[in-house]
Amino acid sequence: MTDVVSGACRALAHPVRRALLRSMSAGECDVGHLCTGAALDQPTVSKHLAALRRAGLVQVRVEGPRRCYSLAHPETLRPLLALLEELANRDDAAER
C-alpha cells in the first residue's frame, strides 16, 4: 500500500500533472485538448499522462486513433485537487 500512496503523491507533486488532472475533472479529455489547455507539446503531455496512469490516477479509453483520458477516481480526486490548489494559493499569498 505504501508504494501506491507514494506513487500517487509523487504524481501529484508536479504542477503540470495537477493541471492536467484539473482539466479532466470536468470530464473526459483527449490528448489534443489537454495539450492545448496546458500549452505543451504532445510528447510532454503524454509523458505526464503516463505517470498519472502508473499512479492509478487516470484511465484511458481508446477511440480509433484518439486516446481519451479521465479521472480514475473522480469522487476522491476532485476534493484532493481542490485542497492542493488551496494550499498552493496560500503558499503564493505568503510569498508576497
Image (spheres, rainbow, N blue to C red):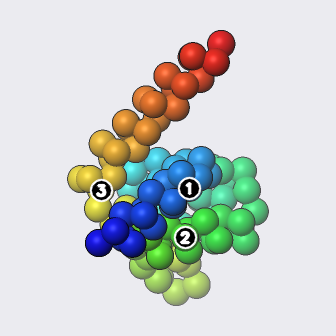
Location of residue 3 with respect to 25 vertically, above or below: below
Spot occupied by residue 65 in the image (x, y as percentages of width and height): 58, 84
Q: Amino acid at mark 3?
A: Pro
Are the residues at dot 2 and dot 1 in contact (C-beta closer than 8 Å)? yes
Q: Are marks 3 and 2 in contact (CB under 8 Å)?
A: no
Nearer to us in this view, 24 or 16: 16
Measured from the top left, where is residue 71 in percent x and y? 37, 62
> Residue 31: x percent and y percent?
59, 67
Residue occupied by mark 3: 74
Q: Is residue 31 above or below residue 64?
A: above
Who's the residue at 47% across and 82% down the image?
A: 63
- Viewer-side residue, 59 vs 65: 59
Determine contact: label 1, label 3, CB under 8 Å: no
Q: Nearer the viewer, mark 1 or mark 3?
A: 1
Q: Quadrant of the N terminus?
A: bottom left
- In terms of secondary structure, where does tag 2 sit? helix
Q: CA distance from mark 2 to mark 1?
A: 8 Å
Kindly state the secondary structure of the residue where label 3 is placed: helix
> On the rendered image, what quadrant is the C terminus found in?
top right
Residue at 63% over, 71% down:
46
Local crowd at mark 3 within 10 Å, few (<14), some, or many (≥20)? some
Q: Which residue is mark 1?
A: 17
Which residue position is annotated with label 2?
51
**SS for tag 1?**
helix
Q: Residues within 10 Å of mark 2 (few under 14, many from 20)?
A: some
- Separation of residues labelled 3 and 2 (CA atoms): 17 Å
Taking the image as shown, residue 14 lies to the left or right of residue 80, namely right
Q: Is residue 94 left or right of residue 38?
A: left
- Sequence-wise first label, 1 or 3: 1
Query: Which comes before the other along the chain, label 3 or label 2?
Result: 2
Query: Is residue 28 toward the left or the right of residue 11 in the image?
Result: left
